Image: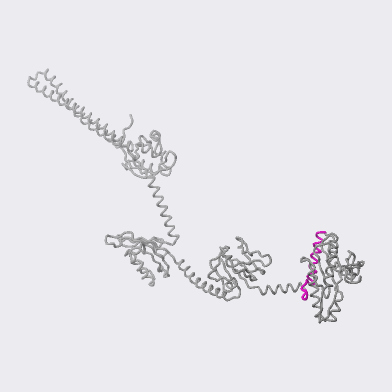
Amino acid sequence: MRLRTGVARIVMWRGLTSRKSLGHAGLALLVAGLGVLAASILLSRLDLGTEALKLCMQISVAVAAGALFLAVMSTRRISEDRQQIAESEMRFRRAMADSAIGMAVVGLDGRIRETNPAFAAMLGYSREEIEALTFFQITHPDDLQIGRETMDDLKAGTVNSFHFEKRYLRKDGTPVWAHLAGSVIRDENSGRPLYLVSQIENIDARKQAEARIAEAETRWNFALAGAGQGVWDLDMRKGGTTYSSTWVKMLGYADGELDGDTDRWLTMIHPDDREIVAEADRAHLEGKTPFFEAEFRMRHKDGHWMWILDRGKAIERDEDGRLIRAIGSLTDITRRKEAEARLTVSAAMLADEKERLRVTLQSIGDAVICTDAANRVTFMNPVAEKLTGVAGGEALGKMLGHVYWAVDEETGHRIGVIRPAIGGLAPADQNSRAVLIRRDDTRCSIRQVVSPIINERNEFCGLVIVFQDFTDARALQRQLAHAAAHDALTGLANRSSFIRAMEELVGQARKDGTSGKGGGHQFMFIDLDHFKLVNDTGGHAAGDALLKRVAAAVRGVLGPEDIVARLGGDEFAVILKSGSAAGAKIAARSIIDSIGGLDFTWDGRPHVIGASIGLAAISANCGEVDEIIARADAACYAAKAAGRGCVCVAPEGEIVDGKAVPPEPLAAAS
């Protein structure tokens, strides 16, 4: 028969005790009645008399009737007790089965004799599975000692009830916290412990919440300590203010040394800051501000001053609005205040430096434009306003292209302002052939330097463009360059620039492998006839005037791509950029005719001159420039020897003693 549990077992035990008492009384009366009856029968044989026998019989009947009555009463009481025991056991079983809290009956060996569904469900077992185990098998290994100590105390009779917390293991192996409360059931006569009745409450959610709260509190304390913050708690019920250990240590005090007096902190505030703090405190207490906040200096225990940020809020007031409790935080902001002081000094110095820079930029003769990283104009000095034709106030915030547009003087392409690559070097970009195009389409030659602005993090922050009006200098440069390459009298190419052009053409002919017969370039050496007579009769002024007329005549006959130069005195040279030897003869004849047809008069006296021309090809095998000129010069002398006013073509001959071998004279009459 299965063991009855809990309250039902206790009630059953007491019922059995009552029935035993009543049964013993009935049995005694029955034995007494039987004794009286036996005595009556014995006395009837002894002939004691009718009265005596009658008395004995009456006593026997009375005793027997009493015994019968007691037997009936005992039977009825036993039936009622059994019914009460059954009802009590049913109630206990229903309570155990329907209880939301786990319940279990455990033997002294730790085996689970009976449990309810709540306990089995808490651990993920069925009732049959869990009743086949012991409490030690389902207890967390770290908490086994708790159960063993309790069992030892119960066996020793030192305790009759118990309650403690420990971890069980679910069927899947995960731990669960539980609170146990129970008592030991003992034998009524011997007091020997029989088994334990336990109630097991699942407190895992509470334990996890406590762990989260503890973890959050630990993080909070670490955060406060790391941020240099402390907490104060003003509670009028407790009669004072308490401060966190973090804070009192920051002020150099020991734990609890500052607790108590609600006004002590005011005495530690710098005298110059007390009124500000008192005003902020009054404003919050009167409900004018949602919280109290003030920055002030507080004296450290060793005497130096610390800057404090104090923030607090009243969280409880009485019916009359008087403060009952307030909580707040104290933050050490000494470093921040020191940094702010340094920043204030730095800002003042920066402002001074900025003003000096502004005055400098306003005063210098160069134009300056500054932009930000997005290429928007942030600064223009007066010179930049003048050169661009845009006022500084109008330019600020505009894209650079709306204010400053520079193109290359030779190509006409816009000169872009390019930001440097990330992490790359950022040298200044200089350009001496830029042309600034203003809004009214007027142009100004400039020299510009574009410098990127890179901060300490190697980030691009903008540009500084410095430019100058270079119009006059550029014109002078062009004049000097033209004078260096052109004859001052005629404006034609001079000897040095002509030789450079010849060298380039000779080098290209060698590279291309061109021949003198099939095309390429032709060199023409021109020497004026009868020019010395003009100089002798009219003077050098007349000669110079005539040379100008000759240069214009030669230039007018040739094409724009052909090169014409004055080599010196009355000697001229021409490079025909394209054409054959036959074409070169035709061009030379045209030059001779043009010069011979000049109508030149000086001081009322007409002068007639002519020209003799020698031709030489510029080809891959023509030799050096000097050789080509020497051959053409020899051909020119041959033309003069042939009667002047004609053309001779130099053969590709040899140079002897620095002079070309004279060609055979060719008639070149018109």
In the rendered image, residue 304, in percent from the top left (x then y), is placed at: 43, 70
Q: Is residue 107 visible?
A: no
Can you say which quadrant of the picture contains the N terminus?
top left
Q: Is residue 281 above or below residue 106?
A: below
Please tell me whether the stretch drawn in magenta is mainly helix, strand or loop.
Answer: helix
Seen from the viewer's position, the closer of residues 491 and 401 is: 491
In the rendered image, residue 617, in percent from the top left (x then y), is placed at: 85, 64
Left or right: 401 in relation to 46? right
Q: Is residue 194 above or below residue 33?
A: below
Query: Residue shown at 60%/66% (left/top)?
Result: 452
Seen from the viewer's position, the closer of residues 81 and 186 is: 81
| The magenta stretch spans residue 661 | no
Seen from the viewer's position, the closer of residues 555 and 383 is: 555
Instruction: Point out the residue furthest to the right here.
Output: 664
Q: Provide the residue span drawn in magenta.
A: 487-513
Q: Is residue 108 above or below residue 426?
A: above
Can you say which quadrant of the picture contains the C terminus?
bottom right
